[in-house]
Image (spheres, rainbow, N blue to C red):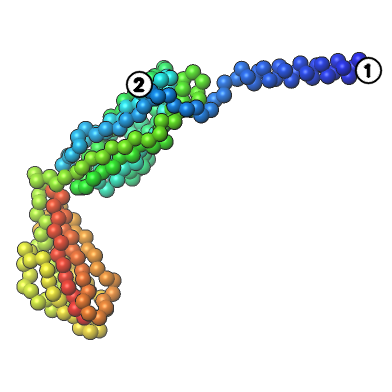
């Protein structure tokens, strides 16, 4: 009868020892709530910038407990802005970046300055989300929420602002108006059996862009085609073609 009692005692001591060891092991990557003075802000170097100019955004992290590792997700409209800074801290492309940093020493405050170039006019929104850091003392994870900033990109008058066409050629039909780069509406008549309306538009400025909208196939009646010319400055103009079949 003594052997079972001794065995039970031994097993009890082993269980207590295992529990004690588990309590002493740090709970890595446990998520904890952020403190009131754990903050993250994102600011732009200016509220407004001109197309073609460079600018920066600044990300500032402050924490109550020192950090060991930091990650954050940065999103923006890559048709309006282009990241031109170093690739040592950010990874990704097409306006979808991950900022990641590891600290050899305990750090409670860190500021990052990221360089960009303004590509097109418009309101560019920067969103910083999934901002998490691991505390240096126990590697527990603290989430800082989100931070945002906006930048208005305006037309740059120092750049070429010519948004006219130098040439507009149609492959079929008769144009009522005489071609003139300063005339922005044209009325064109095509035969009844015409299904497609091919045309070409050449901008006066080689660096300007041309975008077209219109139906793929013609229908009976009036078909509207819009040609948008955007100058390097960001200025734009629309040419409208009213095609009657």
Q: Is residue 41 left or right of residue 158?
A: right
The percent coordinates of residue 4 (x first, y second) are: 89, 19
- Real-space CA distance between mark 1 and mark 2, rounded to the nearest whole angstrom: 65 Å
User: Where is mark 1, residue-wise?
Assistant: 1
Q: Is residue 104 visible?
A: no
Task: Say what secondary structure mark 1 lies in.
Answer: loop
The percent coordinates of residue 27 (x first, y second) are: 57, 24
Q: Which of the image's four quarters has the N terminus?
A: top right
Q: Can you tell which mark lies on residue 73?
A: none
Figure quadrant of residue 36: top left
Q: Residue at x 10, y 65 (%)?
A: 184
User: Where is mark 2, residue-wise?
Assistant: 109
Q: Which of the image's four quarters has the C terminus?
A: bottom left
Task: Say what secondary structure mark 2 lies in.
Answer: strand
Q: Is residue 110 left or right of residue 151?
A: right
Q: Residue at x 24, y 34 (%)?
A: 44
The percent coordinates of residue 102 (x first, y second) are: 42, 25
Figure quadrant of residue 149: top left
Crowding near the residue tagged with mark 2, few <14, some 14–19, many ≥20 C-alpha atoms within 10 Å = some
Q: Residue at x 10, y 59 (%)?
A: 164
The percent coordinates of residue 12 (x first, y second) are: 78, 18
Crowding near the residue tagged with mark 1, few <14, some 14–19, many ≥20 C-alpha atoms within 10 Å = few
């Amino acid at each position: 009868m003594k052997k079972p009692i001794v065995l039970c005692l031994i097993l009890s001591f082993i269980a207590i020892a295992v529990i004690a060891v588990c309590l002493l092991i740090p709970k890595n990557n446990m998520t904890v709530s952020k403190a009131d003075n754990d903050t993250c802000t994102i600011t732009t170097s200016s509220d407004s910038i001109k197309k073609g100019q460079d600018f920066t955004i600044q990300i500032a992290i402050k924490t109550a407990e020192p950090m060991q590792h930091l990650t954050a997700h940065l999103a923006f409209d890559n048709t309006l802005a282009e990241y031109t800074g170093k690739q040592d801290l950010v990874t990704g492309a097409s306006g979808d970046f991950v900022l990641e940093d590891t600290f050899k020493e305990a750090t409670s405050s860190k500021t990052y300055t990221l360089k960009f170039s303004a590509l097109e006019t418009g309101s560019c929104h920067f969103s910083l989300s999934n901002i998490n850091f691991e505390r240096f003392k126990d590697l527990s994870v603290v989430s800082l929420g989100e931070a945002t900033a906006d930048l208005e990109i305006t037309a740059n008058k120092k750049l070429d602002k010519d948004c006219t066409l130098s040439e507009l050629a149609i492959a079929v039909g008769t144009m009522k108006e005489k071609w003139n780069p300063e005339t922005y509406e044209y009325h064109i008549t095509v035969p009844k059996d015409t299904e497609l309306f091919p045309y070409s538009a050449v901008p006066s400025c080689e660096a300007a862009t041309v975008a077209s909208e219109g139906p793929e196939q013609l229908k009976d009646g009036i078909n509207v085609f819009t040609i948008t010319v955007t100058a390097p400055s960001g200025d734009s103009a629309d040419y409208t073609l009213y095609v009657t079949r």
